[in-house]
Amino acid sequence: MYYNILFNKWAKLRVKKMEAALKMTPDYSMDLLFVRLANLLAPYYEESIKAMHKQNPSRFEDTNNPFTIADLGCNDTMTSLPIYKRLIETIRSINPELPIIIYLNDLPHINWNVTIKNAKENLKAYKDVYVHMAPGSFYESIFAPNSIDLFFSHLALYVMSKHPG
């Protein structure tokens, strides 16, 4: 229930933030638009991590159990990188030793070589951050139950017709 409320709240917020980003992007370059949007939304993702920590502090203490993040609809990751960095830094402010796994999800036909290269090159400064591919439609089950701590979608929620599977 909490996640449905959060999903709906974020969907409305994202539309407002996208409209604001459009006004700030005079050339309407989509790449620039989504990078600006990521920077506008980053504090909200940080707030979510802090709320998770407040609800379940023990989850952030177990360094044998990596914190898992899934980016649904990641494409080439370039527009999500500011969010990855903000999430990593927020998690590390809580526990600097907690390993982090980021699962990149998108449809199988995207160029996964570019996607994984972009993510790994841009996140290499972070110790114990692991990037994995998870191709497939998020309308179907991709991950085992209770295996992901935080799902997010920077771009794909704009075009969704229903909740993910």
Image (cartoon, rainbow, N blue to C red):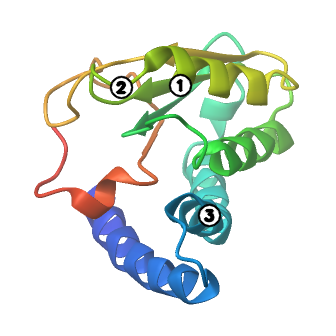
> Residue 45 at what x, y percent from top left?
59, 58
- Distance between the alpha carbons at the discs numbered 2 and 1: 8 Å
From this view, report whether residue 2 is shown above or below residue 65.
below
- 99 or 40: which is nearer to us? 40
The answer to whether 162 appears left or right of 10 in the picture is left
Q: Residue under circle 3? A: 32
Residue in the image at 37% along x and 18% along y:
134
> In the image, what residue type sits under mark 1?
Thr
Q: Are marks 3 and 1 in contact (CB under 8 Å)?
A: no
Q: Secondary structure at mark 1?
A: helix
Question: Quarter of the image containing the C terminus?
Answer: top left
Q: Residue under circle 1? A: 115
The answer to whether 150 appears left or right of 122 in the picture is left
Residue in the image at 76% along x and 22% along y:
121
From this view, report whether residue 101 is shown above or below residue 39.
above
Residue in the image at 34% along x and 79% along y:
12
Q: Residue under circle 2? A: 110
> In the image, what residue type sits under mark 2?
Ile
